[in-house]
Image (cartoon, helix red, strand yellow):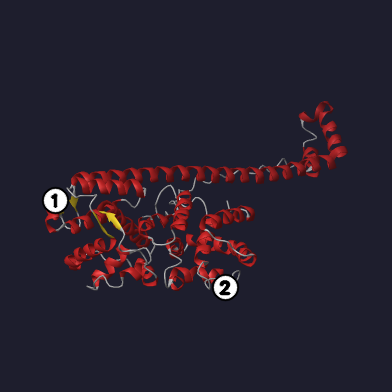
Amino acid sequence: MAASDADIRERLSVLWEEFGLTPDVATAKAQHTAARAVEAWLMTSEEDPEIAIRAAQILLMDPERPGANKRRAWGALRSVLSEAWPNAGTAGQNIAYAQALLLATWPPGTQEAWLGTILVFDSARAAVHGAKQRQEAVDRWRANLKPVGSRAPRAVAEAVPNPPKIVVTQFDGITLDVTAALKQMETHRSQNSWGGGVGAEVVQVLRDYGIEITKISDSLKLVSREVNKQAQALVTYTGQTIKSLVAGQVQGLREEVRDNRAELGLLWWGQARYCHALGIPYRRLAREGADSLLWWVAYEAADLSQELETEPAAAYLVETLHGLGQDIFERKTLGQWIEGTCAALQSLGDKAPRVSANLKAVADGDLLGLPVTWARLNAARNGGLAGAADAVALDLETEIDRGEWASWIFREILLDRFLAGDS
């Protein structure tokens, strides 16, 4: 259910205060006018996953970072804002205002839509550099928007076979042709059954009430046709209702079976600790280096978790790494983790999984908040770390631990899988 204009105005007022923004009358009016356009833009993400990604990237942006207003993500939203807010992007705080607009209009119940991919950017929040007050406010509001799960949009349920067609037979009434009846009775006047005056009385009744009897016959036919029409409509409605209920039950059972199978698959993988991609146990892979092991464990965990909730699956991934002897609390800068992943992928050569065409199209437009994807593309080019900070617009000096970096890889691979499935 869409929020009312009053609700959105109230949300914006609260967000402006938390963001430390003080709009003048003209800016406030432009924001209120632009809110519905932003809401409509977010809703189109049901068909276009790139919109959901750009919206999530805008929430990550540091408005004070040089070149922020030239990012592809900001340009995508600015084109929507231009009519209601012509000078959007001309002031340093306008990105902060746009972040407030996104949070105020973000549709509820996004767990089964592309807006649920906002979870993929949870890792990036740790390396966002900017006004602390605003970032804390974004995090707080963002937590309230957090979907239940992380699944990509699911396909429509397979059709349930149509129930047998039921036809209601029409009753055509009793045909009472008085003229024919009188003629028939005249032919039997000489028979014994005619005696006793009964036949003569019947003839008299037919002659006296012939018109009324014909009307009764016609009325029976008319009533029968109407009853038949209503009965057939009732049969059709009942059949459609039953089919809909059965379809819902079947879909629910399919999803439950699929989710249970996915959970069991991830649990078995975690216990077996076997790298299917390379065909060797993970403990043997550890000899190739900690970064290679971390990459493949995170990559295969994501492959097995497309139908599962992100957070529990990511936690299980970290526990699996711990069971393989990795120091999940070892801390390095984000830049060092990126370099390590680039080196691991370069050593794999042609065995390194390629970025899907859909994610590459997104990355070509803007890599903000996507350092794992940057590393994958950069490794394929055998390039160094130069340019990474500007490309991903994150603070590469931020320290995170091995478990957090593994979760980061996991989330971006999930995004790749979701987008690949949408092609």
Closer to the camera in the image, 41 or 332: 332
Please identify the quadrant where the C terminus is shown. Answer: bottom left
Q: Residue at x 70, y 42 (%)?
A: 224
Q: Residue furthest top?
A: 196
User: Secondary structure beneath disc 1?
Assistant: helix
Name the spot of residue 193 as percent of width and height, x first: 77, 29
Amino acid type indicated by mark 1: Arg
- The reply to whether callout 1 and callout 2 are in contact (CB within 8 Å) is no
At label 1, counting other C-alpha atoms closer than 10 Å, the crowd grade (few under 14, some 14-19, many 20 or more) is some
| Residue 259 visible at all | yes
Tell me where residue 7 appears, x and y as whole percent: 61, 52
Q: Quadrant of residue 83?
A: bottom right
Location of residue 203 with respect to 94 vertically, above or below: above
Instruction: Left or right? Give the position of 208 relative to 291.
Output: right
Q: Which sits in the foreground, 205 or 233?
A: 233
Residue linked to disc 1: 283
Residue shown at 57% from the left, 42% from the top: 238
Q: Between 246 and 264, which is closer to the camera in this rendering?
A: 264
Whether residue 176 appears in this view of the structure is: no
How many neighbours does mark 2 have within 10 angstroms: few (below 14), some (14-19), or many (20 or more)? some
Circle 2 is placed at which residue position?
A: 87
Direction from residue 181 to residue 110 in the image, left or right: left
Q: Quadrant of residue 86?
A: bottom right
**Total residue callouts:** 2
**Amino acid at pointer 2:** Asn
